[in-house]
Amino acid sequence: MSAKDRLILALDVNDPEDAIAIVERFGEWVSTFKVGLELFTSAGPDIVRDIHARGGKVFLDLKFHDIPNTVVRAATVVTRLGVSMFNLHASGGFEMMKRTSEAVVETCLRENLPKPKIVAVTVLTSISQEEFKKDMGYQHGIRTHVKHLSAMAHRAGLDGVVASGHEVSAIRNSIGSGFIIVTPGIRPSWSPPDDQKRTMTPREAVHNGADYLVVGRAVLSQKEPEKALELILLELLSS
């Protein structure tokens, strides 16, 4: 996979015009753009169509987490929208993930649509080990929990998971190749971590086994974002 295809640029804005300006500005550097809750709530499905019209792919980051019927119906709509990847929360359970995967496959076969990749969110990168145990009440550690959720997503037929770079090697060693790992919280050594607790550099994440890296503020908050993106791509090429 090329560095351009491996990188996903987050459109963390609420104005669709700003989002499209980013797509047009960085389209030659990045193939896929992440549309999250903020932008999708503001712009709706049209933002996905507008990105497609400009040759970009979309990772729809809405993190579906509800009863199986509701998620299945939402996933079917998203599939028809033509996104290349979308996610749901693994903590929604095995049945939710399995039924969603099956419904998407059935829809694609019936309507002759390209199948989007479905990835399950494990533990958010904004959650620290201390918070995971003290505030959320888990007795085991984050890595153990992520491995468990990843194995469940794999059994449910999903294409992969979303996980911090700190858990990537454990997932890869446990499940093996062919299972997609999308890693957010990517921060080059020269970029501050912000509200992300479990961060990792691009080179480290790829070395550990990540397939896709999500970057946003590490690029767009820089005075020279093109230069920042170039440095990240060069780091990936040298991994």
Image: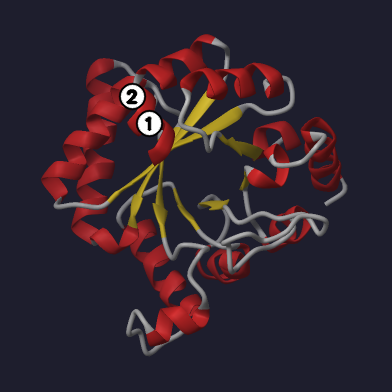
Q: Would residue 197 be found to the left or right of residue 235 on screen?
A: left
User: Where in the figure is residue 148, as x and y percent of width and height?
Assistant: 39, 72
Residue pictured at 19% horizontal, 40% vertical: 72
Secondary structure under tag 1 reads: helix
Q: Horizontal and vertical percent for residue 163?
A: 52, 60
Q: Is residue 78 above or below residue 202?
A: above
Residue position marked by numbered label 2 in the rendering: 44
Residue 21 found in image quarter:
top right
Toward the top, the furthest residue is: 53
Q: Nearer the viewer, residue 239 or 214?
A: 214
State the separation of the CA atoms marked 1 and 2: 5 Å
Q: Residue furthest bottom?
A: 139
Q: Which mark is residue 226?
A: none
Q: Nearer the viewer, residue 10 or 108?
A: 10
Q: Secondary structure at mark 2?
A: loop
Please give the name of the residue rendered at 41% of the width and 75% of the height, measured from the top-left corner.
145
> Is residue 95 shown left or right of residue 6?
left
For label 1, the residue is: 40
Task: Give the residue type at disc 1.
Answer: Phe
> Label 2 near label 1: C-beta < 8 Å?
yes
In this view, the residue in front, 37 or 96, is 37
Q: Residue at x 63, y 26 (%)?
A: 31
Q: Quadrant of the N terminus?
A: top right
Displayed quadrant of residue 205: bottom right
Q: Residue type at mark 2?
A: Gly
Q: Is residue 237 above or below residue 185?
A: above
Q: Residue at x 15, y 49 (%)?
A: 68
